[in-house]
Image (cartoon, helix red, strand yellow):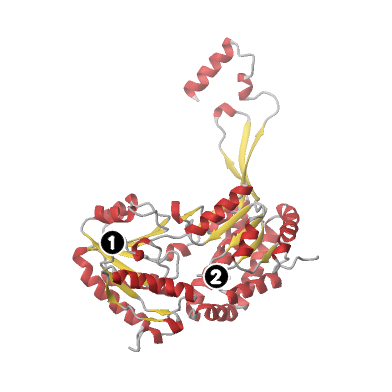
Amino acid sequence: MKTVPTSAASGLPQLFAQQQARSEALRREDAAPRLARLRKLARWIADNRAAIQQALYADFRKPATETDVTEIWPSQTEIRHTIRHLKQWMEPHRVETPLALMGARGWVQYEPKGVCLIIAPWNYPFYLAIDPLISALAAGNCAIIKPSEMTPTVAALLSRMAREIFDPAEVTVVEGNKDVATKLLELPFHHIFFTGSPQVGKVVMRAAAEHLSSVTLELGGKSPAIVDETANLRDAAEKIVWGKGINAGQTCVAPDYLLVQESVQSQLLEEIGKVVRRLYDTEGNGVAASDSYARIVNQHHFERVAGLLEDAQKQGATVALGGHVDERQRFIEPTVLLNAPSDSRVMQEEIFGPLLPVRTFRTLMEATDEVNSRPRPLALYVFTQSRENQRYLLRNIPAGGAAVNETILHLAHPDLPFGGAGNSGLGRAHGHAGFLAFSNEKSVLRQRIGLTGIKSFYPPYTPKVQKMVNLLLRWL
């Protein structure tokens, strides 16, 4: 089969047409070929573990173990979970029939959407390309993946992966800058899965509207961690530092700021300092010497995060922990900021880096009002040993997802739908939710031949028919 060179933007319409033609055959497949593609993907990931680690290290010095935990393990977990449940997900779903439709049967059957576009981000460039691909393949679609140009080594690796294990008419990786992404968005994809910022998400949604393409938008926002006076402070500190420190804070669901009850602030800050030293400075040589701590992805983002730190200090914030930056290696130390004003950039923008502003509250209502004064977050983290406080915060703070006495890990649970709310995203991903996102849920009603309940309401509308309608409205 002749393939279109994916490096040339001019070849994208032909590539799309090629996949569109192939999608008609995939639509008729049963579970077996879908499962075969997923198993092939799982084998490739296992066989290329070292190459994945090296690519992530080359792009932003991500530790190999962190790559295993945050890129490889969740990808393999998602594949295994999907393989285990796919036949069940593909089965038509029977629904009950109301009495007024007596004689009919109804069910929902699932069919592929067709040709899908996956636009992956730079912060978890392997996992966040593979995870939606798993759902797309499970649902029987063709897919074009556009990886981020900010992580070129991983993008090249993904391109090699696609060439080695997929027919390009089924899965292709298209490398390039934002101009290539713009050209892709001009094509009439049947579904677009985008992971990135709310600002770019709006651009994607506008482009999708031109073709009425469905979208899944995994965006971001300022995700709060709330620690009340009943919390186990040592445990909370460990989980907050890990959630903020992993990938040097470049995580869409990282705790973006910390709200701590006034009475326990000093103890929590002390515990946070201990945890930072234990995780990233065990030898006492400084966090920069740690081989367990990543770097900021590029100069632009380094300057952006360093600028947030500088602006906060100029506006009166104080550094309670960390604060060291090194432009030569794009290093920013885990940093705790106190008293950052509400209108400072660090409290207004998504940080996407290892800065943690800390603010205090006296009552849960105060904390709730603080969070709800901003757009709805992607994640909410609640640290408490009080069931009443837990219920109050979960009930009164809208968010895409939440974790109690934990950070990040709700993202890794394959049976928990993942996504945002409002400004932080649209649609759901992972597991069955991901399968549904890439599927058309076709509603089917099959009627019996001959006498049916609805025929009692056919014209002419005689008094007898009207009486039947009156009974319908009253009782059914």
Mark earlier in primary sequence (1, 2)? 2
Task: Identify the residue under disc 2.
Answer: 125
Q: Quadrant of residue 468?
A: top right
Badge 1 marks a residue whose secondary structure is loop
Label 1, label 2: how far apart the Cα atoms are:
33 Å
Task: Report if residue 33 is visible in the image.
Answer: yes
Viewer-closest of 318 and 418: 318
Determine which of the numbered discs, if any, sits on residue 265 in the image: none
Q: Nearer the viewer, residue 18 or 106?
A: 18
Name the side, left or right, on which 422 lies relative to 404.
right
Q: In terms of image quadrants, where is residue 367? A: bottom left
Callout 1, which amino acid?
Thr
Residue 225 coordinates in the image, percent (x, y): 33, 63
Looking at this rendering, what residue extends furthest in the top direction?
463
* Residue at the farthest front position: 314
Task: Determine whether 446 is above or below 156 in the image.
Answer: above
Residue position marked by numbered label 1 in the rendering:
384
Q: What residue type is disc 2 on?
A: Pro
Q: Residue at x 72, y 63 (%)?
A: 10
Q: Nearer the viewer, residue 428 or 457?
A: 428
Residue 179: % across, % down: 62, 64
| Image quarter (top left, top right, bottom left or bottom right) of the N terminus | bottom right
Q: Position of residue 293 (x, y in %)?
A: 43, 80
Q: Position of residue 475 (x, y in %)?
A: 48, 23
